[in-house]
Image: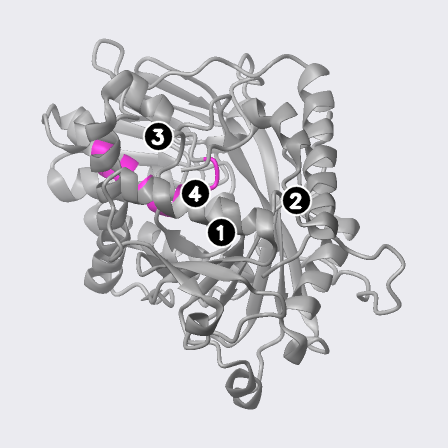
Amino acid sequence: MFKVERPRNSPDRAPAPPPPSDNPWARSLWLDGVVQDLSPREQLAGDHTCDVAIVGAGFGGLWTAYYLKAADPSLRVTVVEAEIAGFGAAGRNGGFVSAGIAGSGARYARRSGWDSVLRAEREVLHGIDEIGRVVSVEGIYCGYKKAGALTVATNEPQLQRLRARVEAKHSSGLGPEDIRLLTADECADLIPGPEGLLAASFTPHCARVDPARLARGLAAACERLGVKIYEQSPAEHLGPNVVQCRNGRISADVVVRATESYTIRERGQRRTFLPLYALLIATEPLPQQTWDELGWRDGIGFSDLGHLFYYAQRTVDGRIVVGGRGAPYRLSNPVSPENEQDSRVYERLCQTLREALPAVADARITHHWGGSLAVPRDWCMRTTFDRKTGLGFVGAFGGHGVTASNISGRTMRDLILGHSTDLTSLPWVGHQTRNWEPEPLRFIASRLIHKTLASADAYEERTGRPAKRVRLVAPFLPPSH
């Protein structure tokens, strides 16, 4: 659906990207649209003692706090956040509560067996519904709507990858009720296919959500349970029984790191993750007449199978959000506000929108933003807890964080409380991975990967044949499931 090849001298070029919001906490569409006040909560000052200290008020940290406190109200649970709750990837992503495990099924299977991989796949499907349950119980207004998602193919190589992906899912134990192939005509009931659409896969296991409202609502739910949240309190050091912040210190029996890509800012952690940015654009709210013309069923999400893939959703307030990867990796300050916009990616996203959905070609673009993903060397997530030191870790979600973080939060609850459950035997529990290569090797490799994938998409679009050059960078790419 979303082609990667773009004419460099197109006469129909996009206008300049909209300027970022003056409010540093409201630069994404989602955070800009939060109804509640974004003023920071109290900062940590002086010494503080608790049972469990969690560093990071994104989805990983908030779900961990929520489930711990709900399971044992007597626990003193504290969350510290460098900015505000939902500031990072939680408030900047594409807004999909999606299926698919974070990481390589084959890598997990080598350690835990294929049965554990199937259980992991099933747990992800349950996680989508579990998020919907909490949203309902806690009264979090975030536009959650579970209607499914399409992955489309518009050329022969993409069609081959689409079929292989569906076959792999069925081989792993999922059925046609979980994922199935659709013809171009069958897609028409969900959204009219673009010119050149060959086929698509459909899964009912996907929900649309406003991620910032979910994160902010989850933070408020944590506080109602008795969790203490300190904001604008960056952690400078984490260790057994201690979190040292800029203006205070927390002593705790258990310390959980949930800092995702921001982990690399800590001394000695630079090579833990490769921080990759996903960038997005949003249109103005569209009139109902346009939605009638589009025939886009509310709640359905889209993605394509280009090597530099794209995705789109229909928001609760009637906008279209289109996002994708391809933002250049920067050697200095790889996680910084300067990386949240890129003129070349912006132009590519606008062109994607015009080609895929001509009916909205003239729609005004109101927001352009981005968020960084925490990509581990093997692209596999992990949830770990060392009872001897009291140190825990949730993260390495690699772009699957909305659903994966919920699973990690429930798993960390069970690990801390000492409960042996199905969650604590999932394949990412205790998983370890090596660090990324040192700079400048990582910088050079990331730029080479981007150029290779972009040229591969152009080649496949032009020739209709798979680009063999992708094999050269396959060891560094996210796994196909």
Percent x, y of residue 361? 70, 75
Spatial separation of the CA atoms under disc 3 and disc 1: 28 Å
* Residue marked by disc 2: 465
Say which of marks 3 and 4 sits in front.
4
- Residue sitting at x 36%, y 63%: 148
- The residue closer to the viewer here, 291 or 263, is 291
Relative height, residue 62 to residue 206 (above, below): above
Kindly identify the residue that appears in the image at 27 percent across and 10 percent down.
389
- Residue 401 lies in magenta, yes or no? yes
Residue 164 tag number? 4
Work out how far the residue at label 3 is from the one at label 2, CA to CA, in angstroms: 27 Å
Q: Nearer the viewer, residue 450 or 331?
A: 450
**In the figure, is residue 122 to the left or right of 419?**
right
Mark identifier at residue 105: 3
Mark 3 secondary-structure assignment: helix
Q: Which amino acid does label 3 sit on?
A: Gly
Residue 181 coordinates in the image, percent (x, y): 38, 58
Q: Mark 4, residues whose alpha carbon is within 10 Å: few (<14), some, or many (≥20)?
A: some
Q: Mark 4 belongs to which amino acid?
A: Ala
Mark 2 vs 4, N-terminal side: 4
Label 1 sits on a secondary structure element that is helix
Amino acid identity at mark 1: Gly
Mark 2 is on which residue type?
Answer: Arg
